Amino acid sequence: MSNALEIKELTKHFSGFTLDRLSLTLPSGCVMGFIGENGAGKSTTIKLILGLLKKDGGEISVLGSTLSEGGKELRERIGVVMDECNFPEMMTLRNIGKMMQKCYRTWDAGKFARYQREFDLPQEKMVKEFSRGMKMKLSIAAALSHDSRLLILDEPTSGLDPVVRDEILDIFLDFIQDENHSIFLSSHIISDLEKICDYIALLHRGRLVFSEEKNELLERYVILKGGAAQLQGLDPRAVVGVRENSFGVEALARRELAPAGLVQEPASLEDIMLYHIKSERHGIGTERGV
Amino acid sequence: MKGMLYKDLINLKQQRKSWLLIIALYAFISVMQNNMQFSFSMVAVLSVLVPISLCSYDERCGWDKYVLTMPLNRVEVVLAKYLFCFASLAVLLLLPVALAWYLGTGLAELCVTVAVNLLMCMLLQGVLLVSLFKFGTEKASAVVFIPIAVVFLGVRLLQRFSTIDVYGGLQYVLSAKWLGWAAAAAAIACYALTFFLSCRIYANKEF
């Protein structure tokens, strides 16, 4: 299986922040969720992938070639949705269709019209009159209306209500039915990622904490619940993080090293992310009142 | 690149009422005062307003970032902006030319005046475009007034503290026959220089 996206040792320095030797791989036909707290480096990574920032080190390969090697042909095959709708506010859908047709050789006007109908987007209204949900749908419609093989999405569902988010996720699921299509998706909304992702990469303070298959990740970790004394005797290698609250103590632990006798619950992606980030912040896995 | 030109045209069209009002006002005052140069000053004003307005639209919606994810290279993005701004300048120049003809200006004088004004507007627009690509709309809008202020203050100072007759000198230069060609050549050279400078700045710009 070829890779839609390969990043090796990607490094970018800013004053006060460094994206530090990031490496990850997104196989073709898969969806990768890119998570991390605000300022972790997610948008920086996406900008580096798209060539909006210049890297200080490392390699990025998109659909088998670098951006400079791939040139315009490669750009035709990358669909991009940023966290805001980037179309000029004074334009109508008709204007946008005409403009995009002049920009993309592979622009499919029929497809764009179909998405407009499917998303119920008004033809004659200007973009500035659209709701946030409509703007995001427009961005997605545009990203899907040329020969996109890889969608790169930076927080496409943030600020949207659950109904619109669900509709958008359905569109992504539909897109991914073609095994040559892939999605690299950054989001804070972990429940969205849980629905559609095959892989999850967690970034914290510019460093990759993990990049793994979602199912393996969910299988690997478990939430342990019990009293402080019970959890104190745990194998340190098993514990990612501990949190204490008024009801007792909870820990995220590796399932294979978790002792029998403690209450075990499945760990969600949100649990896995939070415990990893907190444990990284504090050096080890002890955190009160997370 | 056609897409970029189309986008700028649509953006500009949305403000057509304001543009037409400015043009009508300048035309009216020029005719009333029988002053051709006044209508040329409108071209200078609009040659600055058009690029600022277009870049401001682009920045506000994040188009300046988005466009770089499309199948266009950075030189094409810069070239599209220059082509559009130059075309708008050429179209705008038609009005004072028509007014000058209406006011009965001689052909030779008209050619020289058009050439000199074109040089000034292209120089102004070129400096502005470089600044816009370098600093963005907010800072560039301030930067472009620096050369204008320097020229204006320089002339004022020369008039006040020296015996040099600035306007008399300009009049002499304007009457020279070779000036039209020289001004046109200088305008093209300056514009081309700012274009290459803009390309260089934009090639290294990060978003």
Image (cartoon, rainbow, N blue to C red):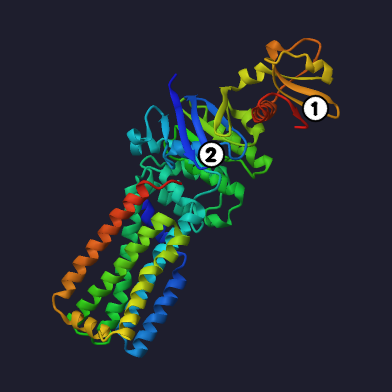
Q: How far, Cα to Cα, is label 2 from label 1?
A: 31 Å
Which circle, 2 or 1, is nearer the viewer? 2
Indicate left or right for A284 with B49 as reference: right
Residue A211 position within the rendered picture, expressed as x and y whole percent measured from the top left: 56, 24
What residue is shown with label 1? A244
Relative height, residue A274 to residue B124 (above, below): above
On residue A17, the disc is 2
Identified at 39% across, 38% down, the residue is A75
Which residue of the protein is positioned furthest toward the front in this rendering? Answer: B161
**Image vertical order of residue A282 relative to residue B110, above or below:** above
First-in-chain label (2 vs 1): 2
Q: Whole-percent x and y of residue A200?
A: 58, 26
Q: Identify whether A234 is placed above or below B90.
A: above
The label shown at residue A132 is none
Task: Determine the image quadrant of residue A164.
Answer: top right
Q: Amino acid at mark 2?
A: Phe
Say which chain tag 1 marks: A
On screen, residue B125 above or below A221:
below
Residue in view at x 83 percent, y 20 percent:
A228
* Label 1: how many Cα within 10 Å (few below 14, some 14–19, many 20+): some
Q: Nearer the viewer, residue A34 or A99?
A: A34
Tell whether A21 sits left or right of A226. left
Q: Chain of mark 2?
A: A
Q: Residue at x 57, y 44 (%)?
A: A119
Which quarter of the picture shows residue A50? top left
| Residue A79 seen in render | no
Image location (x, y in percent) of residue B181: 16, 71
